Structure formats: structure tokens, C-alpha cells
Image: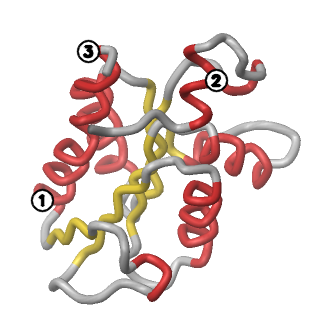
Amino acid sequence: MTALSPALRACVLGEAPGWLYPLITVLLAVRAGRALRGLIKEAVEATTALACRIGEYVVGGSVQREILRNVTGATVLLADISGDGPNVYIEIGAARAVDVPVALLRKGPPGRPSFMLRDQQVWDYGTDAELLGRAVRVSYPYRRYFLSGG
């Protein structure tokens, strides 16, 4: 069974600061073109009934701070670890530090992730269609948990 992140728990109990609203989010850190990211966002939102945010649409005084706030307040982080993107690893580290579940996506053949991520499931994909399918599959349990009340 999927555990509630501390941020979600605070929202449910009404103890969350205002910047955590809307109530729950799925944050996408996915390496894909704008059109594909939009499709993934729509599919995950339709599957989970949760608001889905993509980092490039974050606004605020300090974009970096807002991204970290979104990461630490997310219900789940879908992160693409294809290639060597240091920003994605920073986001993963921030999420793991506050117990936000992380779903790791990676393009290419199966392989071992970085040492600090070896305790996490990696969802490998080869095509854009597989990426979309993996994103929907890993986000689905969060819908079921939230709607069923645990």
C-alpha cells in the first residue's frame, strides 16, 4: 500500500502552508518534447484525478525555490533519469529527503542506476509510447489510494 507523503498528510489534516495548495500534485521531471510532456501531463491527470505540474511552468520570485517547494510538496515525483541531468538528481534528492515517493523513468536498455538510487524501481522505456504508458502505470496507484481513503 502506498504511504501518504508528509506534505499530503499535512494537506489532509489542514495543517499545510498555503503554497501546498492545490491539495495534491504529481510533479513531472521528464525529458521529452513539449508536446509529449503535455500528453503525459494530460494522461496522468486523467488517470489519477490529481493536478500535475511540469517544472517549466513554475513561476515565482525564485524559480529554483518554487521548483523545490513543488517537489517537496508533491504526492509523487515522476523523474526521468535518462542522461546526466543534474537538476533531476537534485529534485530526486529533495523528494527523497522529505519522503515523497519517486518513480524513476529511463530511456534505453535496462541498467543499474546511480548508487543512491539502487533501492528504487526504475521503469525503462524505449519509445515515446512506452514513456507515456510507464508514466500512467506508475501514477495509477496514487489515484486508487487517494480515492479509496487508504
Residue 148: give its label.
3
Which callout, 3 or 2, points at the residue further toward the start of the chain? 2
Amino acid type, callout 1: Glu
Image position, residue 138 (x, y; %)? 24, 48
| Among numbered discs 1 and 3, the one appearing first in the sequence | 1
Q: Which residue is mark 2?
A: 10
Residue under numbered circle 1: 130
Q: What's the distance in space between the residues labelled 3 and 2, CA to CA?
A: 18 Å
> 26 or 60: nearer the eye?
26
- Residue 83 position by quadrant: bottom left
Q: Viewer-nearest of labels 1 and 2?
A: 2
How many C-alpha atoms fall within 10 Å of the one at disc 3: few (<14), some, or many (≥20)? Answer: few
Left or right, 26 with reference to 138: right
Question: Residue flagged by tag 3: what amino acid is it?
Answer: Ser
Q: How is the rendered protein coloured?
A: secondary structure
Is mark 1 in CB contact (under 8 Å) with mark 3? no
Mark 2 burial class by Cα count in 10 Å: few <14, some 14-19, many 20+: some
Q: Is residue 20 above or below residue 40?
A: above
Q: Nearer the viewer, residue 121 or 91?
A: 121
Q: Residue at x 58, y 48 (%)?
A: 56
SS category of the residue bearing label 3: helix
Coordinates of residue 96 in the picture (x, y in percent): 56, 59
- Of labels 1 and 2, earlier in sequence is 2
Identity of the residue drawn at 68% across and 48% down: 67
- Residue type of the residue flagged with mark 2: Ala
Identify the residue shown where x is 74% and y is 25%. 19
Q: CA distance from mark 1 to mark 2?
A: 34 Å
Spatial CA span between label 1 and label 3 = 28 Å
Q: Secondary structure at mark 2?
A: helix
- Badge nearest the viewer, 1 or 3: 3
